[in-house]
Amino acid sequence: MSRNSDQNYGALWLLTPTVLLYLATFFVPLIMLGVLSFARFEASVTTLGFYFDNYVKIFSDGITLKIFFQTVRLSLMITFWCLILGYPVALLMRSCSPKMKMVLLFCVVSPLLTSIIVRNVAWLLILGRTGIINDTLIQWDLISKPLPLMYNEFGVILAVVHVYLSFMVLPLFGALNSINSSIEEAASSLGAPYWRVFLSVTLPLSLPGVMAGCTLVFILSMGVYLTPVIMGGNFVLTLPMLITESVREQYDWPFASAMALMLLLAIGFMVILSSGVQRLVGRR
Amino acid sequence: MSSVELKSIVKKYGAVTAVASIDLSVESGEFVTLLGPSGCGKTTTLRMVAGFIRPTSGTLSIGDVDMTGVPPHQRTVGLVFQNYALFPHMTVRKNVEFGLKMQKVLTSERGPRVQEALELVQLESLGDRMPAELSGGQQQRVALARALVIRPDVLLLDEPFGALDKQLRDHMRVELRELQQKLKISTLFVTHDQDEALSMSDRIVVMSEGKVSQVGKPTEIYEKPQTRFVADFIGRSNILVGKLENKGKTINAEGLILPNKENMTNGDDGVSVMIRPECVKITKPDPKATSASADVKGKVTASIYLGSIVQYSVQIIDGPNLVVTQNNTGFEDLKNLTVGDDVDVSFPDSAIYILPG
């Protein structure tokens, strides 16, 4: 054992590039963000110092907090739908042949392999006012005017779920795959019908994967920017949009920094919460 | 009444035949072992009885009721796996209670029955532990209690001791057999371990390549194997190709002349002679006796010390090489046998068995 750890220490210097990269691109900007969030922005002039102006503004301007909660709600809905749609896929991937598994995996991962612009233009062609769905339904006289499938929450959720489904399916598949199938067979032989085996054995044993997938998708959804911009038009506002606007239109870096830190804190809170739940489940 | 009955059961996977027409029955209270090398179809057969695999053809009945196409949860079988397969997220008690819950046994009745099952396997004090907090042997006992508590028509054991170390395995073997006889529960046991099969079973079904090679009591299987495969697979044995000679009075087995005590007449064709290593006697040549006193002479070519027994390879002069084992009774005479020593070899009548067919 001791020889092993010696070897590990010896290889530590290999981490140097990674550490330098993180310092330069993550920790330094993060500290700058923290410093800036306490600065004062008046008449387009940033004064460094220790002011709470930006944080007071978040809680008192009436719109930022609302959009923050809207972002959380949207992220929770995206997470929920990813779970509902992803679980059956992961179950199927576990039980099907290796060849079919590769096909499913490819389908799930394919959105990640497509350019974000191409993907969203494709959604436009499908969901738009004159997209395939509306055109067909009107042609068949099922509806008289186009359904609002885009530029609303539905469109945003659909498009984001489409991309992030893989981040749910992969941890779920991992968790399901690690369940020894003889445990399920044991339940079955003890008289449990299929649905009961699922509820009593498969689902509880896959909870670590559920938690991992949900946390991952939630974190990603909290920060997603381009897809809501394209799919939501100006009708669905999220915190990342507000941050971008603050920087790009008003050059108000201090306020943008404060909002960014708030987003970070919310995500951090969620991670702590989920790891707490996982530990609780693990102990039970 | 038979607890389990398989009639011409066949299982094919595409072109591959896993089980080729098996007939098998487990009588009420009987302990039947499916014994064979890996890939012989014994686990497939067990899984068909449990209901996880649907036979390609044939009928299967449990407790005299046809169960051929019935799903596993509608059969009352107790199943114990090699890897225990306990529910890792439930306590020992909940594990054992699970089957009773599924059978919709009243809550008030469940407690005592769980307790009774845990007492049966001597784990009554560990009911609140999680499976991960138990040793392998304890986990296997929980699995046994969980299978027994539902009072199954038949207990199915799939290499249940495979993951235990040797001492524990030997101990569990005795314990399981005692429990089985106490409860008089019909049991179908799958193993590739001949010691387990010989020591526990009422009847052994030796399987090879999806077929039944021989069915019989442990003594019959060991002493009167019906095929070369069984003779080879069970225990160590010397199998020699022989020819009847001297008007059928003797057998010439690869140069070794043996009496034909059972008056086998297998046409004029060859016969297979089985000689169990432990039945052959070897002694150091008596220097006082004349050289003609011993029928057969040999030379030790290898010796392996195994503790309670010593295994020798003996090259018979003008004959085959035989494996011979002798009990290590501590007599210096045998202990001093080393490679290259000459020995007298004698074959009691019981040592020679002629394989039928």
Image (tube, rainbow, N blue to C red):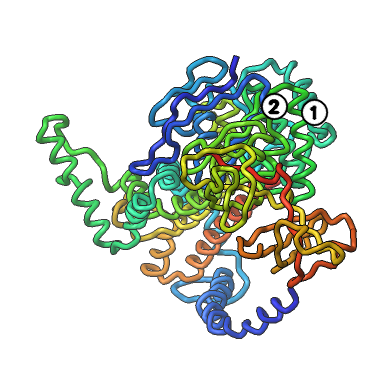
User: Looking at the picture, how far across and down is residue B123, in whole percent?
Assistant: 81, 34
Question: Residue A203 sits in which quadrant?
Answer: top right
Q: Is residue B244 above or below residue B98?
A: below
- Residue type at tag 1: Leu
- Farthest residue to the left: give it: A139
Q: Earlier in the sequence, mark 2 or mark 1?
A: 1
Q: Residue at x 79, y 24 (%)?
A: B116
- Residue type at tag 2: Leu
User: Looking at the picture, how far across and down is residue B279, in whole percent?
Assistant: 73, 48
Picture quarter with the C terminus of chain A: top right
Question: Residue A12 sits in which quadrant?
Answer: bottom right
Q: Residues within 10 Å of mark 1 (few under 14, many from 20)?
A: some
Determine whether label 2 and label 1 are within 8 Å by CB: yes
Q: Is residue B59 above or below residue A15?
A: above
Q: Which chain contains the residue that carries disc 1?
A: B
CA gap, disc 2 to disc 1?
A: 9 Å
Q: Which residue bears the numbered disc 2?
A: B148
Q: Is the residue at mark 2 from the same chain as the one at mark 1?
A: yes
Q: Which residue bears the numbered disc 1?
A: B120
Does dot 1 land on a helix, a strand or a loop?
helix
B46 and A193: which is toward the camera: B46
Does dot 2 land on a helix, a strand or a loop?
helix
Q: Residue at x 75, y 58 (%)?
A: B294
Q: In screen coordinates, is B322 left or right of B227? A: right
Q: In screen coordinates, is A110 left or right of B86? A: left
The number of numbered discs placed on residues in the rendered structure image is 2
Q: Which chain contains the residue that carries disc 2?
A: B
Question: Residue B118 sits in which quadrant?
Answer: top right
